[in-house]
Amino acid sequence: MIERAVAWFQGQSTTDLVWVGIGFMAQLMFTMRFVIQWIASEKARRSVMPEMFWYFSLAGGAILFAYSFYRFDPVFMLGQGAGLVIYIRNIYFVWTNKKSASAPDAVPSKS
């Protein structure tokens, strides 16, 4: 088994190995979003979706999209591309809600 793994690595170009590393980094980003969500839910004792979940989703999705583009995998590109739209939209909602929550209450005008 180890000999087979070594032979596989030796048969790869440097560029391919760099992209495999990028793919593993992206997978780690996706794993971390679930770890963050799990920890937040445990602390709250209910299911929650913390803001960091969306940042890890965006980072992992962008890297995986680049990886799928390099590998020219149209199915993977479509899936990751669609996910990126969703992650960006959710981050927009997070930022919008933060901005409206921090805005001072409007003072009604006297007419």
Image: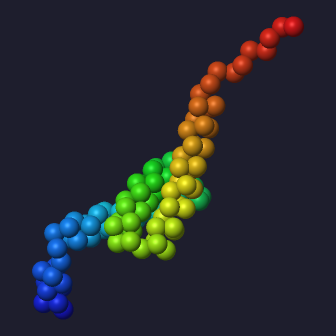
- Rendered position, 51 above or below 1: above
User: Can residue 46 be seen in this snapshot?
Assistant: yes
User: Can residue 28 be seen in this snapshot?
Assistant: no
Q: Residue at x 18, y 77 (%)?
A: 12
Place of residue 74 in the rendered image (x, y in percent of width and height, measured from the top left): 46, 72
The quarter in which the C terminus is drawn is top right
- Rendered position, 109 above or below 103: above
Q: Residue at x 62, y 25 (%)?
A: 103
Camera-nearest residue between 68 and 109: 68
- Rendered position, 102 above or below 70: above
Q: Residue at x 58, y 49 (%)?
A: 89
The quarter in which the N terminus is drawn is bottom left
Colour scheme used in the picture?
rainbow
Camera-nearest residue between 23 and 11: 11
For the image, the number of numbered tags is 0
Residue at the far top in the pictured view? 111
Residue at the far right in the pictured view? 111
Q: Residue at x 59, y 58 (%)?
A: 46
Camera-nearest residue between 53 and 75: 75
Place of residue 88 in the rendered image (x, y in percent of width and height, measured from the top left): 53, 49
Picture quadrant where residue 102 is located: top right
Place of residue 64 in the rendered image (x, y in percent of width and height, measured from the top left): 39, 64
Left or right for 72, reference 15: right
Place of residue 31 in the rendered image (x, y in percent of width and height, measured from the top left): 40, 65
Left or right for 92, reference 61: right
- Rendered position, 93 above or below 34: above
